[in-house]
């Protein structure tokens, strides 16, 4: 199975197109755009300073937070589907990875973006829809039992590459594993607080004030 991981049906031109399309779509900072359009100012100046749905929720507008979550996910799904249609499945995997990088390091706002959880889910929705369902189930299960949003994301992103590898989907497994490593790095402050027992729980007063 691992031999398949090293066999990519990509020309340099196709790879470049996949990277550019994925990155540009992934780098759209929906959290920032939506809060500004709603007259709530710069979401980067509150809470964790993050542009993701969790920080948008700190504005008190749940609808905007849900919209941010969906748009951050679907921008990656759209990137994957567009590239898959025009350039094939291998290019779609590359586009998904580029969308993830674009969300975390968006060129438009100084390369300071989100942590990539919603975008990670959107990539799965485009590449392997069943894995998106598994991701959601794992996230909800951990969130329900522990009430830690960050821990839910950490566990879900860890499970997905393992399941994909077991199923023999090596290319997607490898790409998602790399994204998991990056996502865990972006969650390093959360990991430190989880270890120290100071991480905020879902629904608690001041939940996730630091990220």
Image (cartoon, rainbow, N blue to C red):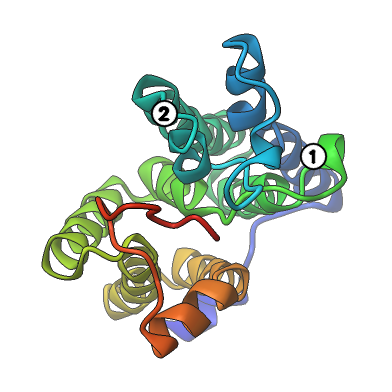
Q: Residue at x 32, y 74 (%)?
A: 155
How many badges with numbers are in the image?
2
* Residue 34, horizontal then vertical, whole percent: 58, 19
Residue 145 horizontal side relative to residue 195, left or right:
left
Q: Residue at x 75, y 34 (%)?
A: 24
* Residue 209, horizontal then vertical, whole percent: 49, 55
**Image mark for residue 151:** none
For label 2, the crowd category at 10 Å Cα-Cα, with few meaning under 14, some 14 to 19 and many 20 or more, is few
Vertical arrangement, residue 31 with respect to residue 45, above or below: above
Q: Nearer the viewer, mark 1 or mark 2?
A: 2
Given residues 202 and 13, the one toward you in this image is 202
Q: Residue at x 47, y 63 (%)?
A: 172
The N terminus, quarter of image: bottom left
Mark 1–mark 2 distance (CA, rounded to whole Å): 35 Å
For label 1, the crowd category at 10 Å Cα-Cα, with few meaning under 14, some 14 to 19 and many 20 or more, is some
Contact check, label 1 and label 2, Cβ < 8 Å: no
* Residue 200, horizontal then vertical, whole percent: 37, 65
* Residue 187, horizontal then vertical, whole percent: 54, 70
Q: Which residue is mark 2?
A: 60
Q: Which residue is mark 1?
A: 20
Residue 141 horizontal side relative to residue 15, left or right:
left
**Dot 2 lies on which element?**
loop
Given residues 3 and 102, the one toward you in this image is 102
Q: Residue furthest bottom?
A: 195
Figure quadrant of residue 82: top right
Mark closest to the chain's N terminus, 1 or 2: 1
Vertical arrangement, residue 106 with respect to residue 199, above or below: above
Vertical arrangement, residue 134 with respect to residue 133, above or below: below
**Dot 1 lies on which element?**
helix
Figure quadrant of residue 67: top left
């Amino acid at each position: 199975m691992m031999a398949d991981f090293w066999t990519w049906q990509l020309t340099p031109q196709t790879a470049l197109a996949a990277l550019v399309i994925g990155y540009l779509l992934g780098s759209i900072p929906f959290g920032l755009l939506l809060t500004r359009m709603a007259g709530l100012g710069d979401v980067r100046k509150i809470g964790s300073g993050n542009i993701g749905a969790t920080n948008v929720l700190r504005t008190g507008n749940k609808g905007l937070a849900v919209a941010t979550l969906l748009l951050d996910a679907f921008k990656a799904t759209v990137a994957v589907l567009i590239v898959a249609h025009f350039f094939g499945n291998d290019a779609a995997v590359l586009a998904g990875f580029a969308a993830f990088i674009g969300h975390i390091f968006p060129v438009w706002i100084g390369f300071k973006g989100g942590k990539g959880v919603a975008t990670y889910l959107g990539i799965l929705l485009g590449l392997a829809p069943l894995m998106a369902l598994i991701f959601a189930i794992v996230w909800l299960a951990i969130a329900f039992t522990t009430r830690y949003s960050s821990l839910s994301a950490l566990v879900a992103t860890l499970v997905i590459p393992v399941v994909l590898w077991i199923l023999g989907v090596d290319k997607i497994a490898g790409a998602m594993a790399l994204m998991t490593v990056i996502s865990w790095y972006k969650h390093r402050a959360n990991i430190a607080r989880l270890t120290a027992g100071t991480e905020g729980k879902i629904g608690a007063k001041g939940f996730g004030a630091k990220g």
